[in-house]
Structure formats: structure tokens, C-alpha cells
Image (tube, rainbow, N blue to C red):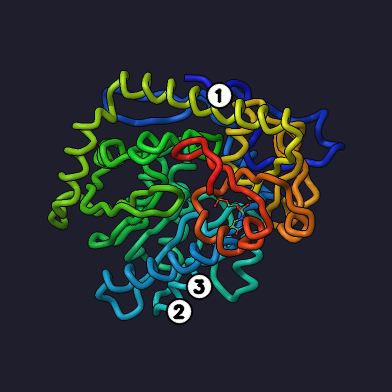
Amino acid sequence: MSFGPMPLANAFLSEADIASEEFYPLEPAICERCGTFQLTTQPAPSRLFRSGYPFRTGSSTRMVAHFTALAAELRRRCAEERPLVVEIGANDGTLLAALTAAGCCAIGVEPVNECAAAIRARGLEVVEGFFNAATAGAIAAAHGCADVIVAANVICHIPDVHDLAAGICRLLEDAGLFVFEDPYLGDMLEVGSYDQIYDEHVFVWSATSVAAAFQRHGLELIDVQPLRTHGGSLRYVLARTGRYPAAPSVEEVLAHERARGLSRRDTYERFRSACEASRDALSTLLHRLHDQGRRVEGYAATSKSTTVLNYGRIGPTLIQRIADSTPAKQGKLTPGMHIPIVSPEHFMADPPDFAVLFAWNHAAEIFEKARAFPEGGGRWIRFVPDVRILD
Ligand code: TMP
């Protein structure tokens, strides 16, 4: 399946950078044997997660609350007085801070230098670099083994799963837990959220594929929990094989995935048709509004929007500006389609007739913050789970 040539999802750029913009083929595939859904080509992680990487966890107050709850749950799962928790991909330290407040000894691993600096500035501990078997060994040597290794929206970014798993096995206490959450393949198929497919998401995991990938390394899936974050995620809990009994949720989800054909080719043939229909419906709507002389803008220059805009060839003629609260994105252009990004304050000062909600996964929070937009007569456009103008 091909989404065509794509720029890097988070490579927001200035006019001067346009000539050197890089593209790669965005082509996911499914393995019918182990059920793994992954990109067939991925730009090297060192090109994606480097200085200038703009995403910050703390930009969503609901995600901050979500991570506070996750920290409390991890603390509850540990009997130790002050468990050692290592977070892979700690971003701005949101979860590390919550873990520390919950009474854990928390250490982050983070490759983006500005993020690592932000973590240190909060007085938290961070190892700067990518998590792999070597980093894991160094942390174990310096601090001992971890009671919990946790990652949120990060494991799907790591192409070398086997090196990752080797690192987990090296660092994790015998009785320890490896807990991670990522956007869920089942939800992506259910709601047609093809915008989950972009360079950083080298995998879109399911219980089937997680169980298959990690069992080779002596790690067993012992619990799964559905989450509403990122438009539908799954939290996976793994431990050394045979150490704990698996919760009934694991077999329930695996059976559900078998019944829904998550490893079957025809499922993805239907998904491809659904993606094409969604792309065409959005494009038709935007062209119609443009022909009627209506002004359309976007809200939230998400990484996911890079797929939607470039797959649909939607540029500044159809969407004149996109509002985003991230200072590092404001004043820049979106990757590939070069739509200018402004602050939400600019957007509200001169609101358009319609706004496409690219951060549909943060709809509740954004509808609350931007209440004045519909109150002033503006209309929201959504494209997941269907393309429509909201009342
Ligand atoms: P995400 O979908 O990858 O979490 O990215 C969310 C993007 O949406 C990020 O660029 C920040 C932006 N955003 C806003 O502009 N306003 C908001 O209220 C929220 C929650 C996010």
C-alpha cells in the first residue's frame, strides 16, 4: 500500500529550506504470519529525533493528566519502597515528573537534546541518546536493574525491535514489568485513521504482533488495556515468560484480533479503499468550499496532518493557515505542502469560515479552548471517522 512520496512528518520548515526538503516513499505492509503492520522504508531515527524535534508532551493538559494516572498505576504495581522506573523516550519529562512525585526513582532516556535539557532543567535524571542494548547495559551497570521499563508513544518509533528487546531483557529485574502504550492497529482500521501512518510510526502495533515480536526474547504479554489516547491506543504489559499468569484480557484481545482478520490481507485491501475514499471526500469538500469563496484553515499542525495533507495534495490554496500552540512550529511551513503555521491567538483574532481539526485525537480539549470559534460562526471540519462539517 502506498501513500506516495512523503516529507518527514515533523520537518516543519522555513522558505529557505524548501529546496533541500527530503522525501521518502510512505509504504506500509502487513506480515500475514505474525500480524505486524509496519513501514517498508523508514528514514533513519537519527534524522527524525534530533535537535529541533518540535513535539512536546506537555502541550496537551489531558495527556499530562493521563500520564499522572499512569505513574500512579505503575507505582501501585510495584511492591518496592522506591522502585526504579526507566522511561524510554521521555520527551519533556512529563511522565518522569509524575513518576517522581508518585515516589519512584525515575530515569529517562531521550535522544533529542532540547528535550533532555528540559528534563534536566526540571531537576530530573536523563540519559541522552537512543535506548538500545548498549544504553540499557550502561543504565543497569550504573543504577541496577529496573522494576519497570515504560514507554508511551515511543516503541512504535523504534525500528530494531530485536535490539530493543535485548535491551529490555538486559535492564529489567527478573520480576520487573515492561509497560508500553501506542496507537492501536485495531482502532486505526476501525475508524480509518490512516494519518497514524507516518515516518515515526514504523510499527502500528496490535496484541498479536507485540506477543509475537517479544516472545522470541523470553518476554510474555501478560495484560492489555484499551486507552482512548491518540484516537485509540493499547497499553501492553510484558514480563519474563512464565513469571506471572496472563490476565484474561490478553486472550480476549487476541481472539478479537483473529476474528477481525487483523493479520489478513483482505482486511488491508478494504482499509486501502477506505483511505482513498476518505482522502477523496476531504478533497472534494475543500474544493467545494474554495469554489464557494469560503475561507478554510486548519487547527493543530500534527505529525499526522503531514500524511493527510500530502496524500490528498492539500496545500495553501485549500487551507490557508494552520493554528498550533507549539512555539517551535509557529512561523514555519508544514512539511511538503508548505501551509503557514500561526499561533491559536492569530487564528482567533481573524477566524476563518471553516477549520479542519487535524488533532482530532485532542478534540475535547481543543473544542473547549477554542469555544469562541464556533460561537463566532466558525464551523469545524473533521475527517476521522468520517469527513463532515460539524454542527
Ligand atoms: P499529537 O496529535 O501528535 O499529540 O500533536 C498534537 C499537536 O496539536 C501539537 O502540535 C500541539 C497541537 N495542539 C494545539 O495546537 N492545541 C491544543 O489544544 C492541543 C491539545 C494540541
Instruction: Tell me the number on the disc at residue 97.
Output: 3
Q: In front: mark 2 or mark 1?
A: 1
Q: Secondary structure at mark 3?
A: helix
Residue that carries the numbered disc 2 in the rendered image: 101
Q: Would residue 287 be found to the left or right of residue 206 on screen? A: right
* Residue 387 shows in this picture: yes
Any atom of ligand 1 within 8 Å of the CB at mark 2? no
Amino acid at dot 1: Asp
Amino acid at dot 2: Ala
User: Where in the figure is residue 121, as x and y percent of width and height?
Assistant: 65, 72
Query: Closer to the camera, 88 or 370?
Result: 370
* Residue 133 shows in this picture: no
Query: Closer to the camera, 183 or 320?
Result: 320
Q: Quadrant of residue 148?
A: bottom left
Residue drawn where x is 56% and y is 35% of the image? 199
Q: Confirm or deny contact between disc 3 and disc 2 (CB under 8 A).
A: yes
Instruction: Tell me the number on the disc at residue 280.
Output: 1
Q: In front: mark 1 or mark 3?
A: 1
User: Where in the figure is residue 211, as x and y percent of width and height?
Assistant: 25, 41
Amino acid at dot 3: Ala
Q: Confirm or deny contact between disc 1 and disc 3 (CB under 8 A).
A: no
Q: Would residue 332 be found to the left or right of residue 162 on screen? A: right
Question: Which image quarter has ligand 1?
Answer: bottom right
Mark 1: few/some/many CA within 10 Å (<14, 14-19, 20+): some
The tag earlier along the polypeptide, 1 or 3, is 3
Disc 1 to disc 3, how far (Cα)? Answer: 43 Å
Residue drawn where x is 35% and y is 78% of the image? 82
Disc 3 to disc 2, how far (Cα)? Answer: 6 Å
